[in-house]
Image (cartoon, rainbow, N blue to C red):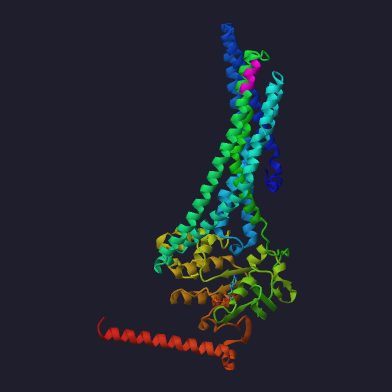
Amino acid sequence: MFHKRLLKEFSDTKKYTAAVVFFQWIGMAANLLFLYTTARMMQNVIFGIFTAQTAVTYLVLLGVFFAVRWAVSAGKNYFSVKTADLVKERLRDEIFSKLLRLGGNYHQRVSTSEVVQVSTEGVEQLEFYMSQYVPQFFFSMLAPLTLFAVTGQMDLLVAGVLLICVPLIPLSIMGVQKIAKRLLGKYWGNYTQLGDSFLENLQGLTTLKIYGADGEYARRMDESAERFRKITMRVLIMQLNSISIMDLAAYGGAAAGILLSIRSFLHGNLTFAQCFFMVLVSVEFFLPLRMLGSFFHIAMNGNAAADKIFGLLDLDEREKGEYGVFPQGELRFEKVSFSYEPERPILKDISLRVRERGITALTGESGCGKSTIASLLMGEYSDYEGRILAGGDARRELREIRENVRFSAITRINHNGYIFRGTVEENLCMGNQNASAADMLKVLRQVDLYEDFEPRGGLAMALSERGENLSGGQRQRLALARALLHDSPIYIFDEASSNVDVESENKIMEVIRRMSKEKSVVLISHRLANVMDADRIYVLDHGGICESGSHRELMADRGVYYRLFTAQQELEQYQGKAGKEEFAENEAVGK
Ligand SMILES: Nc1ncnc2c1ncn2[C@@H]1O[C@H](COP(=O)(O)OP(=O)(O)OP(=O)(O)O)[C@@H](O)[C@H]1O
């Protein structure tokens, strides 16, 4: 019936639940009083003893009844909303904190659309579950017993029969529950899968259009939507059927109560007023459980949503460091091995040093493991072998250091720095909450964006989602400006200047070289012209370091680096020459 863990996690809502049940119970008591008064009045009318005084008494009671009902309903709503607020706020808070703890690569464990679905619709299901279903459950246990206590004093047999019929509703609910559980599990599975593909296709719509694959993907989504439609229909059919079964039990039981009350009246065991009251109250016996039955589907959905939410909250987290200081000094990799999947080693016995100042470059062919090293430095994975040490001789394992301390000591800039919708100022502030306008303008000047942004509003310039109203180079330079404000001792540039125009690339490299005089810079670049100035270059090959040294040393060695470098130089010279020839030809024909 209940999701045990959910009730345990929200045990502090017990007092609100009790208050809701209490108000419901008072409302029911007022209702009984009103029905009994009505029955007495009917009796007086029929037997001709209806006086003006009776009418006034009745009207006063009616007024009191409505006032009580209003107060009860307000009280019940107040405590229901309190429960709903508490559940919603805490669950969303917990989901958010969990995602923060899972870190940037949370999507390797759970899909983004599932997170969105459980934290929106899933949380709302649970809010309803706790604020409506749970109190209704207890009230529907209490109500028939109260009614039995009242009606039993008039006719024990009728009251007994009505009470015995009441469990028919929960029995029919339990019967349906078995089928519902399986069906709702499938329903949620289909729902999140549809959300996944919808989100992915929407994000990749331009790519799908360019390759003319949108038709095929639309067809696949249609299939997915059709599966979801079918399962939704099955859920609805199950709901309608179960409502019919419950109605049969409720109205069948009420009919039995009504017939028995009339029979009892005819045998002279009940007065007219009592019989009339019993007839009216027979339905009341079943209404609370009938109401519970209609909440039941939402409750089942809530159970399935709770499983999903707790599944997310229970995901294993990275090992958490507790050390609260980032020790100064060089970073070291000592015989580090790592793999994302078993049986597929990515890094093998890597040993390297990142000096406290200057540029340490990582280069090598695509897929050799450069970005993986950056991810390990950022602490995204802690299940590596060997040691990653911070602080030179102070030797503190990186994974022992608290995440927020690590993040304020190391800044990583990728090839697609994320720009948020908002203003330039808001995006820059993320780098440093305390940065003044002068600080922000200074970094914009350093990355050559000041002139571009000033006519468009300067710091107040509006940026669209992902900075789509900027060029690729401007976006990347803005991400660099934000990183400069962060002012951390270590910076990792992971292909930060790739995919941008030559001017932006030169500017970014100029800033990197300048900052390396005071900071520790890890530069990952496949373009060797950019790593030439590095103090030390590590060349990776299939997850291992095959060479290391300065540009001059590596060129003298005539190994892998030499081959890569000369091949790249030749290619760039050839491209440059071809470009010049084309330009000269165009000039000659006057184009
Ligand atoms: N999250 C992941 N799960 C599984 N395998 C991964 C994951 N990320 C990367 N890999 C694999 O690890 C290997 C190294 O990837 P990595 O991104 O570190 O290479 P890289 O040298 O930075 O490549 P590039 O220069 O193309 O960016 C690749 O074979 C890649 O397919």
* Front one among 166 and 517: 166
Residue at x-position 57% and y-position 14%: 59
Residue at x-position 64% and y-position 82%: 544
Q: Give residue 262's position: percent from left, percent from top.
A: 62, 18
Q: Is residue 279 visible?
A: yes
Quarter where residue 164 is shown: top right
Q: Give residue 276's position: percent from left, percent from top.
A: 61, 17
On-image quarter of the N terminus = top right
Q: In this view, does 31 lie to the left or right of 471?
A: right
Residue at x-position 64% and y-position 20%: 261
Quarter where residue 139 is shown: top right
Residue at the far right in the pictured view:
394
Q: Is residue 282 left or right of residue 234?
A: right
Q: Is residue 377 left or right of residue 574?
A: right
Residue 185 against residue 507 in the figure, above or below = above
Count of labels in the image: 0
Q: Give residue 347's position: percent from left, percent from top.
A: 64, 78
263 in magenta? yes
329 in magenta? no
Residue 504 against residue 5 in the figure, above or below = below
Look at the image and give the residue range highlighted in magenta.
258-265
